[in-house]
Amino acid sequence: MSDLAICATCAVQFDVPVDDPPASCPICSDPRQYVGHGGQRWTSLDELRRENRSVTRPQGDFLGVGSDGHIGIGQRALLVPYGDSNLLWDCVALLDDALVEEIEARGGLAGIVISHPHYWSTMVDWAHRFDCPIHLPRVDEPWVMRPDPAISFWDGDTLALDHGLSVHRLGGHFPGASALHVPAVDGRRAALLTGDLPLAAADRRWVSFMWSYPNMVPLPADEVRRIAGILAGLDFDVLHSAFWDQQVDDAWSAVQRSADRYIAALQSIPEV
Ligand SMILES: [Zn+2]
């Protein structure tokens, strides 16, 4: 449905037409986002397609998917090899014919997995176009703005997928905030794909752990310690977070070192 309302600030699509939008976007009214500085604005997939073109380029061992113009929060998604097909990790609002053609040529999509509600965007359109399920943690169901049978809610702390891939619920940023673990295979390094948690820092030897990124509100030390503990149990060499080129190498150590620095910063002046 290309004329459904999409929030211009977070790019999440709602199940109402753009000419009859909600009074506000609950996702952007929440302290982890913000209402656009000119007030709440709406767009649609039709409008985004008129004004933007999809862009793909490699991100380490994966294919990054985004657009030439800034849409919503500006994240890119990743196409992750999955047997003869692919998984889409995170999602972007712009799905145009060129992108559909490129993904079909690479084997299509077997599923969509998204780190947290800020990146849900037009996930239902993607699922319908590629006839695949969307896997979301049930604890984040209240944030779904366009309910659809393609959405499959999972419970608990991990979701085991095929081909050795697994989704790990970290919480913290959102109750269901998750990361995708991709094991080493076919010469690819083991990878942790995250959204905002942890997020690569400007210095790519470090990551960070915030509750609200745009409003710069940290997570409590206990939460960072808990999340670092979950990630300590996973084996990965490289981390990609939500935006273009946010690749962290030697990532397992970087995550643990960054958690220590972050906790120290919350408790005292950090040693750097
Ligand atoms: Zn919004």
Image (cartoon, helix red, strand yellow):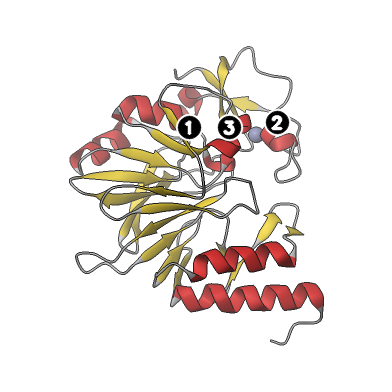
Q: Earlier in the sequence, mark 1 or mark 2?
A: 2
Q: Is residue 236 above or below residue 53?
A: below
Q: Residue at x 44, y 66 (%)?
A: 239
Choose between 53 and 178: the one closer to the eye: 178
Residue 113: name its quadrant: top left
Single out the residue that lies furthest toward the right: 268
Choose between 24 and 43: the one closer to the eye: 24
- Residue type at numbered disc 1: Glu
Callout 3: helix, strand or loop? Answer: helix
Any atom of ligand 1 within 8 Å of the CB at mark 2?
yes
Q: Can you identify the residue that label 2 sits on?
A: 26
Q: Can you identify the residue that label 3 sits on?
A: 141
**Is 96 placed left or right of 73 in the picture?**
left
Mark 3 and mark 1 residues within 8 Å of each other at the beta carbon? no
Q: Position of residue 45 (x, y in %)?
A: 48, 26
- Residue type at numbered disc 2: Pro
Mark toward the viewer: 3 or 2: 3
Label 2 crowd (10 A; few <14 / some 14-19 / many >=20): some
**Cα separation between marks 1 and 2:** 25 Å
Q: Position of residue 256 (x, y in %)?
A: 56, 76
Mark toward the viewer: 3 or 1: 3
Callout 2: helix, strand or loop? Answer: helix
Single out the residue that lies furthest toward the bottom: 271
**Is 44 placed left or right of 161 in the picture?**
right
Would residue 49 be seen by someone viewing this image from the given angle?
A: no
Q: Earlier in the sequence, mark 3 or mark 1?
A: 1
- Residue type at numbered disc 3: Glu
Q: Is residue 4 above or below residue 66?
A: above
Residue 109: name its quadrant: top left
Q: Can you identify the residue that label 1 sits on?
A: 51
Label 3 crowd (10 A; few <14 / some 14-19 / many >=20): some
Mark toward the viewer: 1 or 2: 2
